[in-house]
Amino acid sequence: MSLVNAAALPESPDVDACCAGAQVSAVAAIRGELPVALALRHAGARTLNLRYELHGPAGAPVVFVAGGISAHRHVAASAQFPENGWANDLVRAGRTLDPARVRILSFDFIGADGQLDAPIDPADQADAIVALLDALDIAALRAFVGYSYGALVGQHLAARHPQRVERLVAVSGAHRPHPFASAWRALQRHAVALGQLQCADQQGLSLARQFAMLSYRTPEEFGERFDAAPELVNGRVRVAAEDYLDAAGATYVARTPVTAFLRLSESIDLHRIDPSTIAVPTLVVAVEGDRLVPLADLVTLVEGLGKRGSLRVLRSPYGHDAFLKETDRIDAILATALRPTGDTP
């Protein structure tokens, strides 16, 4: 991999951003964009733009935070970029990931802009992160915190570039995709393809996202939230969860290119790694009832890690989305996982 232009290009803050409800950090945040040349595993040499955000005081330890395929570089609100981030309640004052004490680095996954219509391996994302660290003159990360797809990327980073990260926290991401989850994602991609055949790309993507929401959450949550009799609307039956699903689909379509969804969804299914090659201390966090990443697979991952691995298990009605919903419990786990070596509880 190489930098096409080694100088990072800071962006100006988005002064029109909405900050309603955000807990805004006063610590400086910058955004930038830089082109890098990468040798992609399945698509050959490509020059791609990396878009990143770095939030926190200069000189502080750097923690890379990465989420699911719909996550992006804006993790939490700041004075410069006051809109809510995708993990706003985990990265704020008083939390383990407090931007006053650590620098939070994240980026838009390669392919997230929809410009790369080629297979993307999670290992490619790991190589892109190293290119970004080189450009920012960051020798090593204090930690990589990855949730869902981010956990897969973190595993490849720890295997391919162990000298660049001290420890890994992998939440709801195993060493391989479960066949049931891969089948679920394949059906989502089929929904998009059917929409494209009908010249209804957005409708197909919306339906795919609604299917995905059912896999992210649990029957227990739906039973509690949507236990209401169906309604007759214009002679059709409409069940209680449909408004929620329609809204989720519309929100996703508004911000996600179809190609980005397809290629990043495929990327999850391309993921394979030998746990024994993950060469840094790793905390694996599993959620009991996660329909996409079964507890048994994460136990197998930890067993393959040997002495480098440890496991925490959460019970949550939010299933795969527990990382975003159970923020107090996740923060407590991070507090232990990111404690400097040699500290006592």
Image (cartoon, rainbow, N blue to C red):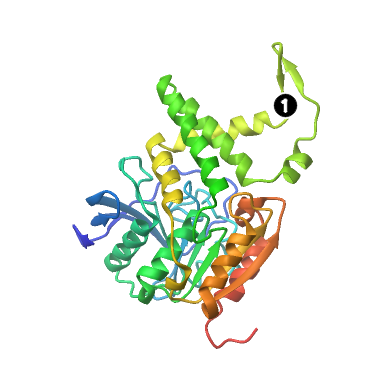
Pointer 1: residues within 10 angstroms few (<14), some, or many (20+)? some
Left or right placement of residue 80 versus residue 332 in this view: left
The residue positioned farthest toward the top in the image shown: 235
State which quarter of the image contains the N terminus: bottom left
Q: Position of residue 326 (x, y in %)?
A: 67, 57
Q: Position of residue 275 (x, y in %)?
A: 48, 69
Nearer-the-camera pick, 146 or 121 = 121
Q: Residue at x 66, y 29 (%)?
A: 243
Nearer-the-camera pick, 143 or 297 = 297
Q: Position of residue 280 (x, y in %)?
A: 45, 76
Left or right placement of residue 232 versus residue 125 in this view: right
Whether 265 is drawn above or below 163: the answer is above
The residue positioned farthest toward the left in the image shown: 4
Residue 161 lies in what quarter of the image? bottom left
Residue at numbered disc 1: 239
Q: Residue at x 51, y 36 (%)?
A: 188
Residue 163 lies in what quarter of the image? bottom left
SS at badge 1: loop
Nearer-the-camera pick, 147 or 262 = 262
Residue 104 visible in the picture: no
Q: Position of residue 23 (x, y in %)?
A: 58, 56
Whether 65 is drawn above or below 344: the answer is above
Whether 208 is drawn above or below 47: the answer is above
Q: Residue at x 39, y 56 (%)?
A: 122
Q: Amino acid at mark 1?
A: Val
